[in-house]
Protein backbone atom coordinates (compact mmCIF):
# COMPACT_ATOMS: atom_id res chain seq x y z
CA UNK A 1 0.00 0.00 0.00
CA UNK A 2 1.34 3.42 -0.94
CA UNK A 3 1.48 5.92 1.89
CA UNK A 4 -0.49 9.17 1.72
CA UNK A 5 2.72 11.18 2.08
CA UNK A 6 4.29 9.48 -0.94
CA UNK A 7 1.15 9.97 -3.03
CA UNK A 8 0.92 13.61 -1.89
CA UNK A 9 4.56 14.19 -2.76
CA UNK A 10 4.10 12.65 -6.23
CA UNK A 11 0.99 14.74 -6.82
CA UNK A 12 2.88 17.89 -5.83
CA UNK A 13 5.69 17.06 -8.29
CA UNK A 14 3.18 16.44 -11.10
CA UNK A 15 1.19 19.56 -10.16
CA UNK A 16 4.31 21.70 -9.92
CA UNK A 17 5.28 20.74 -13.46
CA UNK A 18 1.89 21.93 -14.74
CA UNK A 19 1.80 25.33 -13.00
CA UNK A 20 1.35 28.32 -15.23
CA UNK A 21 0.52 31.33 -13.13
CA UNK A 22 -0.22 33.70 -15.97
CA UNK A 23 -2.35 31.26 -18.00
CA UNK A 24 -2.02 33.40 -21.13
CA UNK A 25 -4.09 31.09 -23.35
CA UNK A 26 -7.36 32.59 -22.13
CA UNK A 27 -5.97 35.95 -21.08
CA UNK A 28 -6.62 35.64 -17.32
CA UNK A 29 -3.55 36.63 -15.39
CA UNK A 30 -3.41 35.98 -11.65
CA UNK A 31 -2.66 39.24 -9.89
CA UNK A 32 -3.35 38.22 -6.30
CA UNK A 33 -4.63 35.27 -4.31
CA UNK A 34 -6.67 35.19 -1.11
CA UNK A 35 -6.55 32.02 0.96
CA UNK A 36 -9.23 31.44 3.61
CA UNK A 37 -8.66 28.64 6.12
CA UNK A 38 -8.65 27.81 9.81
CA UNK A 39 -5.43 27.80 11.81
CA UNK A 40 -5.24 23.97 11.92
CA UNK A 41 -5.76 23.80 8.13
CA UNK A 42 -3.16 26.47 7.47
CA UNK A 43 -0.56 24.38 9.30
CA UNK A 44 -1.03 21.55 6.79
CA UNK A 45 -0.57 23.69 3.67
CA UNK A 46 2.83 24.04 2.06
CA UNK A 47 2.62 27.82 1.86
CA UNK A 48 6.29 28.51 1.15
CA UNK A 49 6.10 26.15 -1.85
CA UNK A 50 2.83 27.71 -3.01
CA UNK A 51 4.18 31.26 -2.73
CA UNK A 52 7.38 30.24 -4.49
CA UNK A 53 5.44 28.66 -7.36
CA UNK A 54 2.93 31.48 -7.81
CA UNK A 55 5.29 34.41 -7.28
CA UNK A 56 2.16 36.48 -6.72
CA UNK A 57 0.75 38.44 -3.82
CA UNK A 58 -0.93 35.94 -1.45
CA UNK A 59 -3.14 37.10 1.43
CA UNK A 60 -3.69 34.57 4.20
CA UNK A 61 -6.99 34.86 6.09
CA UNK A 62 -7.56 32.85 9.25
CA UNK A 63 -11.33 32.45 9.53
CA UNK A 64 -11.00 31.39 13.16
CA UNK A 65 -8.70 34.27 14.09
CA UNK A 66 -11.13 36.02 16.44
CA UNK A 67 -11.89 32.74 18.25
CA UNK A 68 -8.17 32.07 18.67
CA UNK A 69 -7.65 35.53 20.16
CA UNK A 70 -10.64 35.08 22.50
CA UNK A 71 -9.11 31.82 23.76
CA UNK A 72 -5.74 33.52 24.23
CA UNK A 73 -7.32 36.38 26.17
CA UNK A 74 -9.28 33.91 28.29
CA UNK A 75 -6.03 32.23 29.29
CA UNK A 76 -4.31 35.56 30.00
CA UNK A 77 -7.21 36.66 32.21
CA UNK A 78 -7.70 33.29 33.86
CA UNK A 79 -11.27 33.10 32.56
CA UNK A 80 -10.67 29.65 31.11
CA UNK A 81 -9.95 28.27 34.61
CA UNK A 82 -12.92 29.63 36.51
CA UNK A 83 -16.45 30.68 35.67
CA UNK A 84 -17.47 33.85 37.42
CA UNK A 85 -20.08 32.98 40.01
CA UNK A 86 -20.59 36.33 41.64
CA UNK A 87 -20.28 40.03 40.92
CA UNK A 88 -16.90 40.31 42.69
CA UNK A 89 -15.35 37.76 40.32
CA UNK A 90 -16.89 39.48 37.32
CA UNK A 91 -15.56 42.85 38.51
CA UNK A 92 -12.05 41.40 38.95
CA UNK A 93 -12.05 39.92 35.45
CA UNK A 94 -13.24 43.25 34.00
CA UNK A 95 -10.56 45.12 35.96
CA UNK A 96 -7.85 42.73 34.75
CA UNK A 97 -9.15 43.04 31.19
CA UNK A 98 -8.86 46.83 31.37
CA UNK A 99 -5.31 46.57 32.67
CA UNK A 100 -4.40 44.12 29.92
CA UNK A 101 -5.99 46.33 27.26
CA UNK A 102 -3.88 49.29 28.36
CA UNK A 103 -0.63 47.30 28.59
CA UNK A 104 2.11 46.88 26.00
CA UNK A 105 1.38 43.16 26.05
CA UNK A 106 -1.93 43.85 24.30
CA UNK A 107 -0.45 45.76 21.31
CA UNK A 108 0.35 42.66 19.20
CA UNK A 109 -2.97 41.08 20.21
CA UNK A 110 -4.81 44.22 19.08
CA UNK A 111 -3.04 44.08 15.70
CA UNK A 112 -3.92 40.40 15.22
CA UNK A 113 -7.51 41.20 16.19
CA UNK A 114 -7.67 43.97 13.57
CA UNK A 115 -6.31 41.56 10.95
CA UNK A 116 -8.80 38.89 12.00
CA UNK A 117 -11.74 41.27 11.68
CA UNK A 118 -10.50 42.41 8.25
CA UNK A 119 -10.24 38.75 7.19
CA UNK A 120 -13.81 38.13 8.34
CA UNK A 121 -15.02 41.20 6.43
CA UNK A 122 -13.16 40.04 3.30
CA UNK A 123 -14.76 36.59 3.57
CA UNK A 124 -18.20 38.21 3.80
CA UNK A 125 -17.43 40.54 0.91
CA UNK A 126 -16.38 37.62 -1.31
CA UNK A 127 -19.31 35.50 -0.06
CA UNK A 128 -17.02 32.69 1.09
CA UNK A 129 -19.25 29.75 2.06
CA UNK A 130 -16.73 27.21 3.42
CA UNK A 131 -13.03 26.63 3.95
CA UNK A 132 -10.51 26.11 2.69
CA UNK A 133 -11.19 28.57 -0.10
CA UNK A 134 -8.64 29.86 -2.58
CA UNK A 135 -9.72 33.03 -4.39
CA UNK A 136 -7.91 34.19 -7.52
CA UNK A 137 -8.11 37.90 -8.38
CA UNK A 138 -11.03 38.33 -5.98
CA UNK A 139 -13.29 36.59 -8.48
CA UNK A 140 -12.59 32.89 -8.98
CA UNK A 141 -13.15 30.69 -5.90
CA UNK A 142 -12.05 27.08 -5.48
CA UNK A 143 -13.32 25.33 -2.35
CA UNK A 144 -12.03 22.32 -0.46
CA UNK A 145 -8.57 22.09 -1.99
CA UNK A 146 -5.04 22.86 -0.84
CA UNK A 147 -3.59 26.01 -2.39
CA UNK A 148 -1.39 23.97 -4.79
CA UNK A 149 -4.31 21.81 -5.92
CA UNK A 150 -6.52 24.90 -6.34
CA UNK A 151 -3.88 26.51 -8.53
CA UNK A 152 -3.71 23.39 -10.69
CA UNK A 153 -7.51 23.36 -11.05
CA UNK A 154 -7.60 27.08 -11.84
CA UNK A 155 -4.92 26.69 -14.52
CA UNK A 156 -6.65 23.67 -16.07
CA UNK A 157 -10.00 25.53 -16.26
CA UNK A 158 -8.29 28.66 -17.51
CA UNK A 159 -6.42 26.76 -20.24
CA UNK A 160 -9.67 25.07 -21.32
CA UNK A 161 -11.38 28.47 -21.53
CA UNK A 162 -13.92 27.58 -18.85
CA UNK A 163 -13.40 30.66 -16.67
Image (cartoon, grey):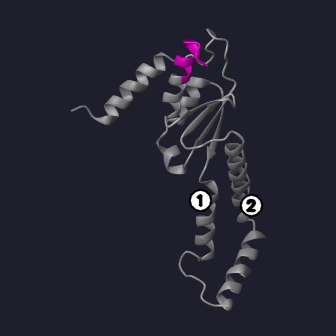
Residue at point 66% right, 16% down? 28
Q: Main secondary structure of the magenta part?
A: helix
**Mark number displayed over residue 68:** 1
Instruction: Please identify the residue farthest to the left as the structure is shown.
Output: 1
Mark 2 / mark 1, whichever is N-terminal: 1
* Magenta run includes residue 156: yes
Badge 1 element? helix
Give the residues in magenta: 154-163
- Residue 35's place in the image compared with 140, above or below, is below
Q: In the picture provided, is 65 more to the left or to the right than 100?
A: left
Image x and y of residue 89, in percent: 65, 87
Residue at point 59% right, 24% down? 54
- Residue 86's place in the image compared with 42, above or below, is below
Closer to us: 98 or 64: 64
Mark 2 to mark 1 CA distance (whole Å):
16 Å
Res. 74 image quadrant: bottom right
Amino acid sequence: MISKNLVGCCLMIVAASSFNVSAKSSGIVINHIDLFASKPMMKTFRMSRFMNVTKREVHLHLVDGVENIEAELGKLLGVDKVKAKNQAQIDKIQYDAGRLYNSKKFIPIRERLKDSVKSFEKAMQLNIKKVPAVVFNGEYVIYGETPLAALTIFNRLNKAGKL
